[in-house]
Image (spheres, rainbow, N blue to C red):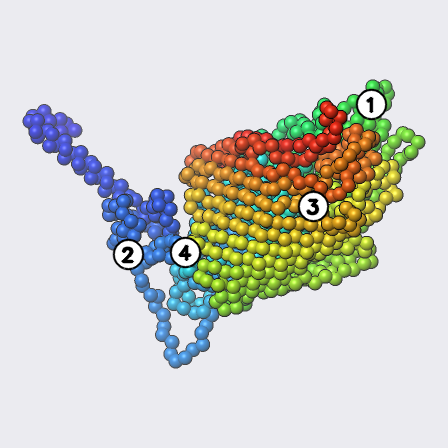
Amino acid sequence: MKVLRQIFRFADKPFRIGLCGLLIGSLLTGTQTRAQSGLALEDFLKSLNQKRGTYFLYDEKLLKTIRVTAPIPWKADTRTLLETALSGTGLTFRRVDDCYLIEREARPFPRPQPTGQTPVRRFTISGFVREKGSREQVNGATVYVDKTVATTNPYGYYSLTIAERDTVELVVSMVGYRRFYRRLPLSGSVSLDIELTSNTLLDEVVLTNTAGARAFSSSQTGQLTLPALQIRNTPALLGEKDVLKTLQFMAGIQPGLSGQVGLHVRGGGADQNLLLLDEAPVYNANHLFGFFSAFNADALQTVTLQKGGFSSRYGGRLSSVVDMTMREGNKQQWHGAVGTGIVASRLLLEGPLIREKASFLLAARRSNLSPVLGDFVASVIEDYTGTTWRANFYDINAKINFDLNRRNKLYLSGYFGRNYFGGGDSLNRTQRWVNVLTWQNQTGNLRWNHLFSEKLFSNTALVFSRYNFETHRKNISTEGETSGQTTDLWRYFDGITDLTLKTDFDYFPSAHHHLQFGLINTVRAYRLNGVQVVTLSALGNQSGLEKTESVETAAYAEDHWNLGKRIKLSAGGRITQYRIRQKAFLRAEPRVSAAVQIREKQAVRASFSDMNQFIHLLSNTGLGLPTDLWVPATDLIKPQRSRQAVLGFIHDFNPRWQLTVEGYRKWMRHVISYQEGADFIGITSAVRASEVSWERNITAGNGQASGLETTLQSRSGRLTGSLNYTWSMTRWQFPELNNGNAFYPLHDRRHSVSVTGLYTFSPRFRLSAAWTFSSGNPFSVPVSGVPSFGHLGLGKADLVITPTEQLFGTESPLVQVRTSFSNFRAEANHRLDVNFQADLGRRRFKHRVELGAVNAYGRRNPFSYNLMINPAGQLSLRRVALFTFVPSLNYLISF
């Protein structure tokens, strides 16, 4: 610096100007040189992806040390940019579907030349697909080698058997992950474990040599896979991410009443869905009377829905299977998260127990503001708004897994959730009354995975599930020596417990066959109509409980078969024996699905499924409320049965856009309902509970459902989403209801439309929205009213049991008399939900802030209708609307 000062002191002005220009030019040139030489090739490709939406396939190891040295002409086309960037690196590129494949310049692998004619040998490529970083298994990933396709099973395992060749190009694709590519020699069978890198964009483009292979990738109809990332990005009521409400946006799935989590799939009832959490069935899976589901999205990895073309491994329900897989926990690092919102607070902890070998996951939620939630539920019933109510819930998910070795793995997982709603008030000067409802779910699962060979995989599981419901009302003394003592008690309780032992096998004999088979045995114990009455009156004390047990044993087998280049077939079946009270039922359930590729990007799919259900749900509302009663099929009440035929068409416009159209027809037999005048405890007076059997209070009938579903979806890029339209019709007919005439059930809706979208501004900022429309559902509206009396349904012989009356009874001055079912169609329902997510912080602590709104434009959608007397003394219907604009604010900190 001293030298420069001396030069500037004695030099003339032109020399100074020239020297300054030289220095500035040198600095700029040096900066540009450092910028270009310091740009890693992988960073260049990521930048190009963000700027132009172009996708790339490459082996990360191949690019690890390569840097871009030449100046980049950013305004040039993509091919020119790649030619410039790869110049002198020994790499080249070629177009594969919608992507550019980066690879070494052609260098064939040395291979000994065969002498004479030798038979074609076949080799197997197999292994596990895991998430990079956490090493959790990835379920449902698609693995391609040329036109040979495999999908990882629920434990991340895949197997492909292909003919011998010099080299193969293996591609793995999964929603929410970057695509994996590997070029490898094939001189023998290969064991290859694959790690997928998580991607903040929902990139689901499946790479094959021809775009049409995606439309032809599976033969099964009505299949859908949701990653946890998509659930967490979907707008939700009060910010509580909900897997069941996310599924309600899909074609063919109708919700119950406005805001409820119940699923009505292709005309089926709320009880006809098999909800599995790590293979354990969950009953009445809702919190806060159905406004939130019991499943914590933080604990879930993937969700698979089947609504047609059912796999033979599933049985026991008529309409759908929702198979939810819990996360395993990070095997390499400890992580945690703490968050809160308006409804609930949550905690997540995960980490290695033994690095690379064992890990755990713990996720918990607890509701906030118990009095506020209680008042919200009670506000639906005007007679109870002056009472202090409390409502709360919590749930816990826990999982531990051990990698004993490559061939053996153990999993232990469990779930526990509980709900409470209660309140009380003064009854008279000497007593106060208290009403309480509680319901809870418990599940546990111990599983053992064993790999016999690269072609045979097994899973053995011991599964436990329990559901309990209880409600009671009691009068408590408030004065004298008996203060605090119960003077009168009415208590009702029921429950169901499952214990299942099962073994499933996956066998991959060749590239054209994938066999699945297994055995399942379930012992199911019921507690029905449990009643306890304690009173000081002359009626005396009463009690009663009916216990019964059933055994369900099933065997299944299914073959996924590639019949040439244009036909795929899945054929199999399930045989089930059901035993209860010395009575046995034997049911055969054939299942078949087929796909035919008619053009390069088009395929036709068809399926037929026969399903049986050996458990019923008794409900006045059909909404899956906790008061609904699970009962077994018996010699008097036959098992439910359905047969469903589906015909569909799928077209890939390009790797991003896909159109799916499916039409279905379903026949249902032995669907049950309460007889007119019966309520959820099957009695009209609590003191006569021991004299009444639930089987005498129900009736059985048949149903039919048909519909047409259309889905147009964009599955990659900054903007993803779908447009779904459903036309459907469902009719039920019971000999003892509605004078034997057919009627539309509560969940029947003729037209449904949903539009969902997610725009990712950057990995840190996302905006999602969902708009839904559905035509009105039918109600059985009363035509007159007469004075009534009592509580818990006393004297209500011919009325519509509303959801709130189902829970609390009624003190209404009117008994509502109806003449026919489904005589009124409600107004159309539509709303807009929005959600904005911002991820802040980059180091040890990361923060997420979510702002959202349900029903953003404040539409007063009907929840129910009440019969009222207007000021003129006339009977009129009053629309009850909930959730007219509900904002939310949620915060999460992770570490």
Q: Residue 368 carries which label?
A: none
Is residue 746 in sight in this rendering? yes
Residue at image mark 3: 745
Residue at image mark 2: 90
Considering only order in the chain, which callout, 2 or 4, is on the residue closer to the N terminus?
2
Residue at 45% in and 74% down? 120
Residue 415 in picture, x, y percent from top left: 64, 43
Considering only order in the chain, which callout, 2 or 1, is on the residue closer to the N terminus?
2
Dot 3 crowding, Cα within 10 Å, few <14, some 14–19, many 20+ = many
Is residue 505 in sight in this rendering? no
Residue 77 in picture, x, y percent from top left: 29, 49
Amino acid carrying label 4: it is Tyr
Q: How far apart are marks 4 and 2 (CA)?
A: 18 Å
Residue at image mark 4: 181
- Per the image, label 4 sits on a secondary structure element best described as strand
Left or right: 316, with 81 as reference point: right
Q: How far apart are marks 1 and 2 (CA)?
A: 89 Å
The mark closer to the camera, 1 or 3, is: 3
Residue at 41% in and 60% down? 209
Dot 2 crowding, Cα within 10 Å, few <14, some 14–19, many 20+ = few
Residue 482 in picture, x, y percent from top left: 85, 23
Q: Which quarter of the picture shows residue 557?
A: bottom right
Residue at 74% in and 62% down? 586
Left or right: 545, with 722 as reference point: right
| Residue in the foreground of this view, choosing between 75 and 510 | 75
Amino acid carrying label 3: it is Pro
| Residue in the foreground of this view, choosing between 631 and 706 | 706
